[in-house]
Image (cartoon, rainbow, N blue to C red):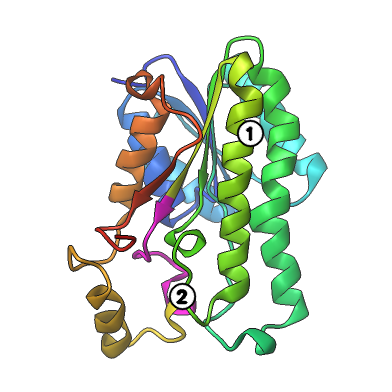
Amino acid sequence: MRLEGKSAIVTGAGSGFGEGIARRFIEEGAKVLLVDLNGETAQRAADEIGEGAFAFEADVSKGAQVQAFVDEAVAKFGKLDILVNNAGYTHRNNWLCDVSEDDFDLMIAVNAKALYLAAKAAVPVMQENGGSIITTASTAGLRPRPGLTWYNATKGFAITATKSMAVELAPHNIRVNCLCPVAGETGMLDRFMGEDTPEKRAQFKASIPLGRLSTPRDIANAALWLASDDAEFITGVALEVDGGRCI
């Protein structure tokens, strides 16, 4: 029960890593607001997880909606201890000049602007009692692959923002860290690979020393540690959860 008595928001929580993180947090005693652009998937996840899980439909790239889900969490839980910026978007693996402007703009909105909006809404709430902010970045921000140039760049933004926020918010006892997963079994996997075929999966697995893709549970366990008091002296870290991919 490492998060007993804690309250959390997890974005992109209707599936994949976000759902896994929300589930793991609740297993460890937290109450969690599951935020997702798709309200139905958020509600489905909350219903399956059960007690302590609450769904909220919102677009993380819209300031008013971000403020609304932070306000909802505070109203439900009385405080906000943990914020997980997990919502993300990627263009399909492609030559950098062929990525559409619409895809580029959406990635900037969801992978970068959303971090700014979440900080504006959550930091004032956390300043009184401290807190933990965790962002799902990517190994793509540390060791970029060809074909995902603009996605890689947004994850580099997330890593730099994490480190800068960690320094600025340390006097307020707000720890800021990010996770850098390798490609995992989520709904965006086919976009990362370009196409989901046995050959593509084998190619990706071959670049991971431990020989497999990441799972939501892998990422959730890392997020749990960073959110818990076990990591009370850890801030500004880009934690590789990658089976050795970045070595």
What residue lies at 34% left-to-right and 65% top-to-bottom?
Answer: 185
**Circle 2 is placed at which residue position?**
145
Find the distance from the CA under tag 2 to the CA under tag 1: 26 Å
Give the residue at mark 1: 165
Q: Point out residue 210 in the picture as x, y percentages from the top left corner.
A: 17, 63
Element on which disc 2 rests: loop
Q: Farthest residue toward the front?
A: 247
Residue at position x 59%, y 10% in the image: 129
Q: Residue at x 71, y 26 (%)?
A: 71
Q: Is residue 144 visible?
A: yes
Task: Please indicate whether residue 133 sits to the left or right of residue 183 in the image.
Answer: right
Is residue 105 or residue 53 the one in the foreground? 105
Q: Which one is nearer the viewer's eye here, 49 or 112?
A: 112
**Residue 149 appears in which quarter of the rendering?**
bottom right
Magenta residues span: 180-191
Left or right of 233, for residue 1 = left
- Please rate how many residues cluster around mark 2, counting C-alpha atoms within 10 Å: few if below 14, some from 14 to 19, many from 20: some
Left or right: where 193 falls relative to 101 = left
Q: Element under label 1? A: helix
Quadrant, the C terminus: bottom left
Where residue 168 sits, quadrant-wise, is: top right
Looking at the rendered structure, the kind of residue marked 2 is Arg
Q: Return the disc, 2 or 1, that comes first in the chain's sequence.
A: 2
Asked if residue 184 lies in the magenta stretch, the reply is yes
Residue 151 is marked as: none
